[in-house]
Image (tube, helix red, strand yellow):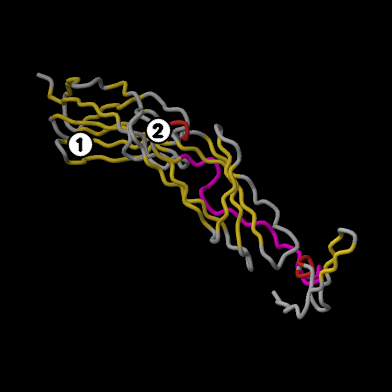
């Protein structure tokens, strides 16, 4: 801003009126705004990168109603010549919140307040002193913060069931109930602490080939491409012995 040194200010009082004389060459503050023809139309809206729409964040360790800590990184493409980004976050429980960011990401921390375990909507626009206006808003995406689920509920073989077989190898059908929103299930079978079989399936049943008479532990976890973590595992035992 150009600073004018006033050589003289003449104040004349006439009939109770005070008149100010401004020396030639000084500008009104509004005259410092750039001429309209020096501003450029804004570019296109920022493109959101992550998280993908309808993603679900979870604390990997927190059980229901225990303290939790969830970090959500919101990331979008940089816009050339952008000087500031406005990030709008709306939740199911709170009014819209505008966050001003100087870079193309923001880390939102959600912890220890169960009212914040809810649905969120977010979008971004960019601004610059070189542009006539802010860009348009980006698309609006959604994400959710929630407890990590339990399960699924196991059906058979029942816990510590004894399975009698005639010969080896043999097989056993592992079955469980579905979990809503789950896209697949992780099946793990152990002898003691050794993992002897691992598979992913979209079904709620799995055929395990038995090669030994011993105590087995089987474990199922539900998963989804939209979940940050698998469910907490459900685990049971069964014992295999040869028929007499």
Instruction: Say which element carries label 2.
Output: loop
Tell me which corner region of the image, top left, top right, bottom left or bottom right, holds residue 67: top left
Mark sitting on residue 147? 2
Tell me which corner region of the image, top left, top right, bottom left or bottom right, holds residue 167: top left
For the residues labelled 1 and 2, the Cα–Cα distance comes to 27 Å
50 is within the stretch colored magenta: yes
The percent coordinates of residue 25 (x first, y second) are: 81, 78
- Between residue 52 and residue 112, name the one nearer to us: 112
Instruction: Say which element carries label 1.
Output: strand
Query: In the rendered structure, which disc, 1 or 2, sits on the residue that comes first in sequence?
Result: 2
- Between residue 164 and residue 60, name the one nearer to us: 60
Q: Which residues are magenta?
A: 34-56
- Quadrant of the frame with the N terminus: bottom right
Say whether residue 176 is left or right of residue 137: left
- Between residue 129 and residue 3, name the one nearer to us: 3
The percent coordinates of residue 100 (x first, y second) are: 57, 54
Residue drawn where x is 55% and y is 44% of the image: 53
- Between residue 43 and residue 109, name the one nearer to us: 109
149 is within the stretch colored magenta: no
Can you identify the residue that label 1 sits on?
190
How many other residues sit within 10 Å of disc 2, few (<14), some (14-19) or many (≥20)? many
């Amino acid at each position: 801003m150009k600073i004018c040194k006033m050589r003289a200010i003449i104040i004349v009082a006439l009939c109770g009126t005070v008149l100010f004389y401004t020396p030639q060459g000084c500008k009104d503050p509004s005259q410092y705004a750039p001429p309209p023809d020096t501003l450029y139309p804004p570019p296109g809206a920022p493109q959101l990168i992550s998280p993908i729409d309808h993603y679900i964040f979870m604390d990997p360790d927190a059980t229901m109603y225990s303290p939790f800590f969830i970090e959500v990184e919101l990331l979008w493409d940089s816009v050339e010549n952008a000087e500031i980004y406005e990030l709008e976050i709306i939740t199911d429980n709170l009014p819209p919140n505008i966050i001003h960011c100087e870079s193309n990401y923001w880390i939102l921390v959600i912890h220890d307040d169960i009212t914040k375990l809810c649905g969120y909507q977010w979008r971004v626009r960019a601004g610059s002193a070189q542009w006539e206006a802010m860009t348009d808003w980006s698309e609006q995406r959604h994400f959710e913060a929630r407890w990590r689920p339990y399960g699924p509920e196991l059906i058979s073989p029942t816990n510590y069931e004894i399975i009698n077989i005639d010969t080896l190898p043999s097989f056993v059908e592992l079955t469980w109930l579905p979990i809503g929103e789950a896209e697949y299930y992780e099946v793990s079978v152990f002898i003691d602490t050794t993992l002897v079989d691992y598979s992913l399936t979209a079904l709620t049943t799995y055929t395990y080939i038995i090669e030994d008479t011993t105590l087995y532990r089987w474990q199922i976890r539900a998963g989804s491409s939209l979940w940050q973590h698998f469910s907490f595992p459900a685990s049971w035992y069964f014992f295999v012995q040869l028929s007499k």
